[in-house]
Image (cartoon, rainbow, N blue to C red):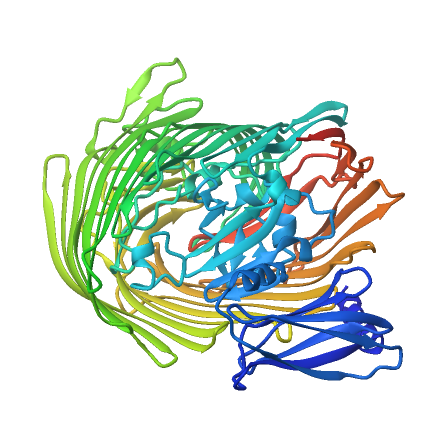
């Protein structure tokens, strides 16, 4: 596969040079000053079709590849200048050519705007505008198919949009939020044929008054402009299908409706299927921000409320042995008046998942190996609602309000056969959690005059979690915790207290965590001049949590045996107050933008377990600096440095035992203190349409001292852990490098992605400090074609190497994944799409070796412009039965085999509105 990629590249380069010429040139103004980011477009004179385009570099230079034996019209344009056109002929014997355009300035800009928008790509400051039709071939089905063809843009395997290595945090359609906080719903649902322009907004800030005042370098948004025929009309699609898999019936129902007008918009998305398509997973639910951001970002404090998710099994890559999905989502926006906009969304999801896996887990401290075979039946019922409003009576004042409500019910029934040194243990587990949260946010922005701007923000979170856990097994759980050991070699001599002796040991746990968290701050910006400003911040965070838990046993006769001792119960109240004052200075000088800052914090902690009280009071001065070097308008280097203070929540302070798993107990430590992290980040970005090369690179280094780690006592495969602050002589360190390189040669785009991450951490196991190291290398190379009249393809190769070194035990796992896809249109009305993904999974010890392939294919038929489409879709054609995965932590390494859905063949009918 690697040789094939190189051969394709060489052949493409050869034919491109042999059958076309390079037209080089420059665009200047009337006094000879080069015009950077000017546009030049070459159209075929006879048909008007776009053949090539370019955007000038900082020297006003451009270059075009033009096929020989044709005539072209060249048109040069720049906003605010008169456009100029020139006709050229490129005969069969033509050689490379040179041409110069001189543009005269003009007062009227309307014509210039229209010409700019016809360009395939336009760069305006921090905004990149793509003309979708310039990159599509007509076979794209969803927005994601369009996005991955755009230079400088990537759609990752989860369907999320990435620009410059950053995930897009907001997707808008016609300037209106599309399910705020998630780009996957957009890439997988917005029809490709509705998209006209795609605007990538870097350094994005949705509040006009705040743009340019602070650091917005991590904010990236995308705005989709619709084609004229899609505005003020309902559009969408109605899809339904049926099929079979292993003699079982399969179905798909997937209606989607969209409406956009200047006054309001409505989006309705539904998806009901049992073929493994999961539009919204439990992982998506927890990561879905709804547009809410980390409140104190840039203030130096990291305090995150933990989710008590009980370690529910997660389908690998949305692949499981059974998947049944019901999904319903709606999104709206409405301009109530010229000054008031309201918007919101609702998401409801009900996923039933069957997960079957076999795992080998190697424990580092004891050398024990556990082999498990498990079956998990899981159901996730999720709900999420958001209501937002923006009130802007004048350009000087804006007020926002947001409310996000999340609730869910997740249950799991699992059976596991655990084998350790030929000893078998049959385990039955039940898990249930019904969390509820409401997050409210109010912001106000006021511009007093050109020199003084104020911003006030307040955010309130209320969260209630009530996880229940039950594990029944054959062997005595946690000898020495639930029993008193008399003889290590003879469990029958144990004193059973509080545990009572049974045929099967059913241990259960109730738990409840309630959280109230209020954040508030006021920012004052004093504008010194056009290139600098001062920012003063004063604010506070107050968090209050209450934690209750209790462990009890269900006896063989059904009676309940309560564990009344304090060691098995929790009743803890915990509060954290962070009062802070910050000062930041922003200066733009020459090509540099400097933003140094410092924040003074006073932290007050109080935890009250079972009536007693413990208090902490700390001061911290936390500096940060951001430096931007703009080498050119579309090329820059960014550097960030910050020290942050990290605090944990009530889960790590509760002293009573808490079940995490059938073989893992955890108890908190009320003496915990915060840790400090130093982070360094250096990134480079170049969006070069002169030579069609786009580069992004990033280097990160993080060092954490006094980190909160776990001290574990492990006996066999059972472990009891507790958090503690490890000595600063044993810091955690993480070093990572990531990069993306793409090059477009005529109708082919070549892309290379690389990610390397190295970690070095310490933990204490059985009173011994163990060092754990990992090195992960992830590479991806691909070439994708974009022909209008020929079959299109993608060829690529992924390589993953994961090396784990835990206490001297070193293992390396390798995954080689060549992949390919093809799209062929034939007999005018037929379209065939197929994709192949091959996995070869091995380790350095040659004890694990597995290879498998996934092949999917679709055959579509649509008669001309008919709204009806008929398709035969087949997934997992080779009927692959399982996939592999490996993971590690400080205590053990795990290699797992997951069973997946069988071959599915579907007949699908779609009607376009």
Q: Is residue 135 in view from this perspective? A: no
- 231 vs 250, left or right, is left
Above-or-below relation of 721 to 874: below
Say which residue appears at 61% left-offset and 49% top-offset: 196
Judged left or right of residue 295, residue 862 is: right
x and y percent of residue 571 in the render?
19, 33
Q: Hey, which quadrant is residue 854 in on the image?
A: top right
Occupied quadrant, residue 695: bottom right
Q: Looking at the picture, tell me which residue is in the foreground, 653 or 139.
A: 139
Quadrant into which the N terminus falls: bottom right
Q: Is residue 79 left or right of residue 787?
A: left
- Residue 718 vs residue 345, the one in the foreground: 345
Question: Which quadrant of the figure has residue 795?
Answer: bottom right
* Residue 607 vertical position relative to residue 253 in the rendered view, above or below: below
> Which quadrant is home to the C terminus?
top right
Q: Give the image location of residue 810, x and y in percent.
A: 53, 63
Residue 872: x percent and y percent?
79, 34
**Is 668 in front, or is 701?**
701
Where residue 543 sits in the image (x, y, percent)? 20, 43
Count of all numbered marks drawn on residues in the image: 0
What residue is shown at x 39% (from left), y 63% (from top)?
Answer: 217
Residue drawn at point x = 33 percent, y = 55 percent: 208
Is any atom of residue 213 visible in this view? Answer: yes
| The residue positioned farthest toward the bottom in the image shown | 32
Q: Is residue 384 above or below residue 851?
A: above
């Amino acid at each position: 596969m690697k040789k094939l990629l190189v051969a394709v590249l060489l052949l493409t380069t050869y034919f491109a040079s042999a059958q076309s010429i390079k037209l080089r040139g420059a665009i200047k103004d009337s006094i000879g000053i080069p015009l950077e980011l000017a546009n030049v477009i070459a159209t075929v004179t006879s048909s008007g079709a776009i053949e090539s385009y370019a955007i000038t570099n900082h020297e006003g230079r451009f270059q075009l590849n033009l096929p020989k034996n044709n005539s072209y019209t060249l048109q040069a344009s720049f906003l605010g200048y008169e456009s100029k056109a020139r006709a050229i002929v490129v005969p069969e014997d033509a050689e490379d050519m040179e041409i110069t355009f001189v543009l005269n300035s003009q007062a009227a800009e309307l014509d210039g705007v229209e010409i700019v928008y016809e360009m395939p790509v336009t760069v305006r400051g921090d905004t990149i505008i793509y003309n979708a039709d310039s990159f599509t071939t007509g076979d794209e089905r969803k927005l994601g198919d369009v996005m991955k063809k755009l230079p400088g843009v990537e759609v990752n395997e989860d369907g999320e949009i990435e620009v410059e290595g950053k995930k897009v945090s907001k997707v808008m359609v016609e300037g209106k939020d599309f399910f705020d906080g998630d780009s996957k719903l957009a890439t997988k649902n917005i029809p490709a044929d509705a998209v006209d322009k795609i605007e990538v907004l870097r350094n994005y800030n949705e509040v006009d008054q705040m743009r340019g005042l602070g650091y917005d370098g991590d904010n990236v948004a995308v705005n989709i402009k619709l084609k004229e025929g899609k505005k003020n009309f309902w559009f969408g699609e109605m899809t339904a299908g049926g099929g079979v898999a292993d003699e079982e019936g399969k179905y798909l129902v997937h209606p989607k409706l969209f409406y956009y007008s200047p006054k309001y918009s409505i989006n309705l998305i539904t998806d009901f299927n049992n073929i493994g398509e999961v539009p919204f997973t439990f992982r998506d639910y927890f990561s879905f921000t709804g547009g809410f951001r980390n409140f104190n970002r840039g203030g130096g404090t990291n305090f995150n409320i933990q989710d008590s998710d009980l370690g529910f099994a997660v389908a690998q890559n949305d692949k499981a042995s059974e998947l049944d999905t019901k999904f319903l989502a709606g999104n709206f926006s409405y301009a109530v008046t010229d000054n008031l906009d309201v918007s919101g969304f609702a998401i409801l999801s009900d996923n039933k998942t069957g997960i079957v896996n076999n795992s080998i887990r190697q424990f580092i401290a004891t050398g024990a190996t556990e082999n498990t075979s498990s079956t998990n039946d899981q159901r996730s019922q999720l709900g999420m609602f958001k209501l937002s409003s923006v009130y802007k009576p004048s350009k000087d004042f804006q007020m926002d309000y947001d409310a996000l409500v999340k609730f869910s019910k997740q249950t799991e029934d699992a059976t596991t056969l655990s084998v350790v040194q030929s000893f078998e243990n049959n385990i039955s587990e039940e898990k249930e959690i019904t969390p509820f949260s409401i997050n409210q946010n109010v912001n106000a922005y006021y511009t007093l005059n050109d020199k003084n701007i104020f911003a006030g923000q307040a955010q309130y979170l209320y969260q209630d979690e009530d996880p229940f856990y039950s594990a029944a097994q054959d062997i005595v759980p946690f000898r020495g915790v639930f029993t008193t050991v008399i003889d290590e070699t003879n469990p029958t001599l144990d004193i059973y207290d509080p545990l009572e002796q049974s045929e099967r040991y059913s241990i259960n746990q109730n738990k409840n965590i309630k959280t109230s968290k209020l954040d508030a701050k006021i920012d004052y910006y004093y504008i010194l001049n056009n290139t600098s400003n001062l920012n003063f911040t004063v604010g506070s965070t107050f968090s209050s949590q209450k934690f209750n838990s209790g462990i009890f046993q269900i006896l063989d006769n059904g009676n309940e045996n309560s564990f009344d001792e304090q060691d098995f119960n929790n009743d803890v109240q915990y509060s954290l107050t962070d009062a802070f004052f910050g000062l930041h200075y922003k200066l733009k000088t020459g090509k540099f933008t400097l933003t140094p800052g410092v924040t003074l914090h006073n932290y007050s902690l109080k935890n009250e377990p079972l009536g007693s009280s413990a208090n902490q009071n700390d001061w911290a001065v936390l500096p940060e600096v951001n430096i931007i070097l703009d080498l050119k308008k579309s090329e820059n280097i960014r550097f960030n440095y910050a020290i942050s203070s990290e605090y944990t929540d009530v889960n790590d302070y509760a002293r009573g035992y808490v079940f995490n798993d059938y073989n893992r107990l955890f108890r908190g430590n009320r003496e915990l203190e915060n840790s400090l992290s130093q982070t360094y980040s250096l990134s480079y970005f170049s969006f070069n349409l002169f030579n069609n090369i786009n580069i992004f690179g990033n280097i990160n280094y993080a060092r954490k001292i006094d980190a909160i780690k776990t001290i574990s006592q492990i006996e066999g495969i059972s472990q009891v852990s507790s958090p503690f602050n490890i000595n600063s002589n044993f810091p955690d360190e993480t070093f990572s490098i990531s990069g993306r390189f793409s090059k477009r040669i005529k109708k082919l785009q070549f892309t290379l992605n690389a990610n390397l991450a190295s970690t070095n951490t310490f933990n204490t196991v059985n009173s011994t400090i163990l060092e754990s190291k990992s090195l992960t290398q992830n590479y991806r190379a691909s070439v994708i074609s974009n022909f209008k009249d020929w079959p299109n393809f993608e060829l690529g190769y992924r390589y993953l190497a994961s090396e784990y070194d835990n206490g001297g035990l070193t293992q390396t796992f390798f995954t080689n994944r060549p992949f390919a896809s093809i799209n062929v249109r034939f007999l005018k009305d037929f379209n065939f799409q197929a994709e192949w993904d091959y996995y070869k999974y091995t380790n350095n010890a040659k004890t694990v070796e597995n290879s498998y392939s996934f092949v999917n294919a679709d055959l579509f038929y649509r008669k001309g412009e008919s709204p009806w489409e008929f398709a035969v879709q087949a997934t997992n054609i080779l009927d692959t039965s399982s996939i592999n995965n490996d993971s590690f932590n400080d205590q053990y390494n795990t290699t797992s085999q997951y069973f997946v859905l069988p071959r599915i063949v579907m007949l699908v009918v779609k009607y376009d509105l």
